[in-house]
Amino acid sequence: MTVEAMGRPSPFRGLMMDDVPLTINWVMRRAATIFADRPVVTRTPDGGRHRYTYRALAERAGRLAGGLAALGVGPGDRVATLAMNHYQHLEMYFAVPGMGAVLHTVNPRLHPDDLVHIMREAGDRVVVVDQRLWPVWEKIRERLPALAAVVVEDGTGPVPAGSLGYEAVLARGEPVPLADGVADDRQAAAMCYTSGTTGRPKGVVYSHRSLVLHALAEAAVDSIGLSERDTVLPVVPMFHVMAWGLPYGAALHGAGLVLPGHDLTPVGLLTLLEETRTTLTAGVPTIWLGILAELDAHPGRYDVSRLHTMLVGGAAVPPSVLAGLRDRHGLTVLHAWGMTETTPLGSVAHVPAGVDPRPGPEGDAYRLSQGRPAALVEIRARGAGGLVPWDGSTPGELEVRGPWVAAHYYGGDDDGKFTDDGWFRTGDVVTIDARGYLVIRDRAKDLVKSGGEWISSVALENALMGHPSVAEAAVIAVAHPRWQERPLAVLVGRGSDRPSDLELARFLAPQFPDWWLPDGYRWVDAIPRTATGKFLKTALREQFHDALEDRGRDRRGE
Ligand code: ADP
């Protein structure tokens, strides 16, 4: 209870030092003054480079805000983007929240019905579309007649009829100084929908305060350790969880930014990493699988010696990727866990004090875990009988809370994901050890429930990806006449050798109980990906749902 609530005036009233709104405008102002000459490099659609500085970024963001205001955008209005990683998208990142409006980054790879649903629900007024992504907009624009479209030109032709050019919008209004436009830091700055791999996309709203605190946290040495001496290349798309907050983190701490545009191929990325002397890059594991394969195929071709951290999250990093990048190419993987609902910085996997940090099984167990919660993030896990002990072995569903963890979904449907005492239920099944290290055993939806007991698909996938002939592995639950569900492994090969089912089972056997071993192995050319590059297990489950229907034999010993 406060002193005032007890009926007495507080002698400290008005004296406290915390009454300063933490807004995106502060981030912009700091970047534009203290780090004015730090670079922002973009690969342009024609394969060239666009370069400018944080000073120029702030100046153009101010003009863009003026142009958007001239289009009728006002405080609280939602402005959507259908765009990849480039400087114009970065300008939107600052201009839209900076003028008190709300930036709604939209994932262009979603199904058209989902796009219409989320843009309607969000109530977007304007959409800013990459010219190359115009066909995505074309498909849905008739169903969203109230939206004005602005096109980020790529020089391949005139802006499509019915839209305005981005540069024309920028030239149109009086520049708005993005200094003090937002008074309340609890006001919405941005929103992003979950990618819907486990249900309908749900809207997550980021406040100014949450984004600024998140950007601050990214500089902690035991989180990502962002600094002015870094050059950061976010491979993770700017339409997905604010590119993990890295654009704001880089600007706040003065790191240079490299934005790869539309070319996310291993060759394209490695070329850009080398040329820009990038020190820190970030993306989902499938990106690094491709990069590792390219580096292995051409040893010595790329000089990425400046790269000190490859931040990997969004799905578990396979041990073979961590070891391959480190042992064959001298590259350091930093594993982190997060979600759209956690902005996303949730936990980061550094080796703790007292443990030998050199490569080896002890340190690697920590590096491959999902790590410890970032400062200000709290965790707990709940099993059937309540909260589970932090013993490193009892599984439970992870719950989190913190200043950049969602409190509700936009649109009112919380889908049972928030507890009465204000924690977010992640749907991830974890164990937590005595030091607070998390290990994700599975996603609640991905668990293989065999005869009432669960099998970790993640553990099997990681082991399979350690086989020299396996490039990628996804383990899914498929219906089984006796055990309800059994694991099936879907594999993409490396090289031409395709080991038999028996060989694979023998390879896995020393690491798992017998009844965990997959009942079948299927080789495919490619594993379908989600819109953000993760394995799309729902599609695999559909494709292989009756793969074991006629199975007489099984692995449960009968
Ligand atoms: P989606 O839910 O559509 O995949 P998100 O990006 O929000 O979109 O995904 C969050 C989920 O991704 C987490 O709940 C977790 O299951 C998974 N995830 C994220 N980071 C990791 C990680 N380091 N290891 C394992 N799983 C992860």
Image (tube, rainbow, N blue to C red):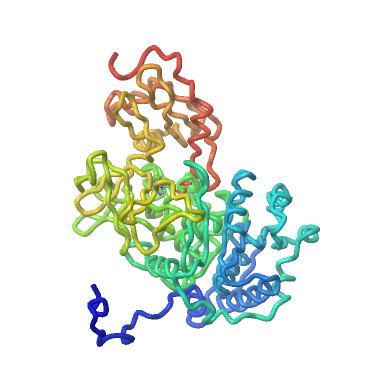
Q: Residue at x 35, y 21 (%)?
A: 483
Residue drawn where x is 39% and y is 65% of the image: 218
Residues 13 and 424: in front is: 13
Q: Is residue 491 visible?
A: yes
Q: How many marks can you see?
A: 0
Q: Given the current orientation, which residue lies at the most extreme front position?
A: 7
Please indicate, yes or no, whether residue 40 appears anywhere in the rendered image. Answer: no
**Residue 435 spot, x, y in % from top left:** 21, 54
- Front in this rendered view, residue 420 or 68: 420
Q: Quick one: quadrant of the C terminus?
A: top left
Residue 30, placed above or below residue 330: below
| Residue placed furthest toward the top | 552
The residue sitting at 78% across, 57% down in the picture is 160
Q: In this orientation, which residue lies closer to the viewer: 7 or 342?
A: 7
Question: Left or right: where does residue 44 sit relative to residue 409?
Answer: right
Which part of the image, by quadrant, shows the N terminus? bottom left
| Apparent side of residue 175 relative to residue 484 in the rendered image (left or right) | right
Where residue 430 appears, x then y in whole percent?
30, 44
Residue 198, placed above or below residue 22: above
From this view, report whether residue 209 is shown above or below residue 425. below
Q: Is residue 154 above or below residue 33?
A: above
Q: Residue 198 location, x and y as percent?
A: 47, 41
Residue 14: give x, y in percent of width and height. Answer: 33, 86
